[in-house]
């Protein structure tokens, strides 16, 4: 899943980015409110973390702008402990939750998981296709009932493929959705991770890989070889 962190304190933003990446999330960062609003409106995020006090545009202004344009992405506000008025205004404007600074990273993760689960029918906890099952809450995956030992990025790839099964996906789309906006498009990181995921999906029994390469285009996740 992809998260936008809009936080003008660069040390805090770096801490959040590092921690969320280690948990398997793709993270984009904005250090200024105008940039944060632009990214939140242009790109498709699963969740937005907004600091209330930022230069350019405040977190409250970004909440109002997103909701006025009918963007339903979950929004978690990060506020100073004495900013009660901002909290009320933010929730009234359409923010989903808030966390006061300083906060523990474990609590932040719990709030994020709760908001992602709250997304309803569009965000099912379990994804199933053929004999592959992925549990988004437990962060586990299995094939034919046997657990797959996936890295965080391989888990994200499998999740994205399951959400977009039987649809051709371009490498650029994978770079945007599973990696970061600033990632080098010429890198072979996508191909390397997909090769590892394909090998793990095959398993010791040599099961069909499910991930197929469409030469010159991208990949497709389906039972049968498209060629």
Image: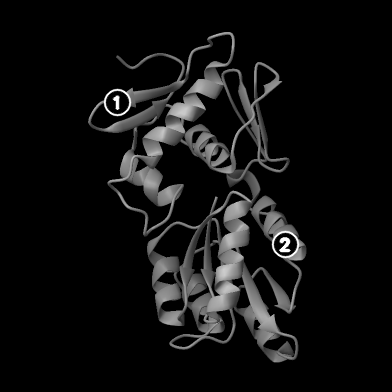
Q: In this view, does 115 lie to the left or right of 175?
A: right
For the point 57% across and 38% down, which residue is it? Answer: 155
Identify the coloring.
one colour
Q: In which image quadrant can residue 137 be found?
A: top right
Q: Is residue 79 above or below residue 19?
A: below
Q: What is the spatial separation of the Cα atoms under label 2 and label 1, in whole angstroms?
A: 39 Å
Residue 101 pos. (x, y %): 72, 80
Q: Is residue 21 left or right of residue 175?
A: right
SS for callout 2: helix
Residue 141 pos. (x, y %): 65, 30
Residue 9 pos. (x, y %): 55, 81
Depth order, front residue of 165/17: 17
Q: In which image quadrant can residue 129 be found?
A: top right
For the point 59% across and 43% down, which residue is it? Answer: 152
Image quadrant where one finds the C terminus: top left
Q: In which image quadrant can residue 56 be found?
A: bottom left
Crowd rating for badge 1 (residues with CA inside 10 Å; few <14, some 14–19, many 20+): some
- Tag count: 2
Crowd rating for badge 2 (residues with CA inside 10 Å; few <14, some 14–19, many 20+): some
- Write down the residue under mark 1: 214
**Dot label at residue 111:** 2
């Amino acid at each position: 899943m992809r998260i936008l962190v809009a936080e003008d304190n660069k040390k805090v933003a770096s801490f959040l980015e590092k921690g969320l990446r280690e948990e398997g999330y793709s993270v984009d960062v904005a250090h200024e409110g105008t940039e944060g609003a632009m990214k939140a409106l242009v790109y498709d995020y699963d969740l937005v973390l907004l600091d209330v006090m930022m230069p350019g545009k405040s977190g409250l202004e970004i909440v109002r702008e997103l909701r006025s344009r009918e963007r339903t992405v979950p929004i978690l506000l990060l506020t100073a402990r004495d900013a009660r008025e901002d909290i009320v205004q933010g929730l009234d404007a359409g923010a989903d939750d808030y966390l006061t600074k300083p906060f523990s990273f474990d609590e932040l993760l719990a709030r994020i998981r709760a908001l992602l689960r709250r997304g309803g029918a569009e965000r099912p906890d379990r994804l199933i296709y053929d004999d592959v099952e992925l549990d988004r809450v437990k962060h586990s995956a299995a094939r034919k009932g046997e657990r797959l030992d996936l890295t965080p990025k391989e888990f994200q790839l499998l999740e994205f493929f399951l959400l977009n099964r039987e649809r051709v996906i371009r490498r650029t789309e994978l770079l945007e959705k599973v990696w970061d906006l600033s990632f080098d498009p010429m890198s072979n990181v996508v191909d390397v991770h997909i090769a590892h995921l394909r090998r793990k999906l095959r398993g010791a029994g040599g099961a069909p890989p499910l991930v197929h390469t469409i030469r010159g285009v991208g990949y497709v996740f389906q039972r049968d070889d498209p060629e």
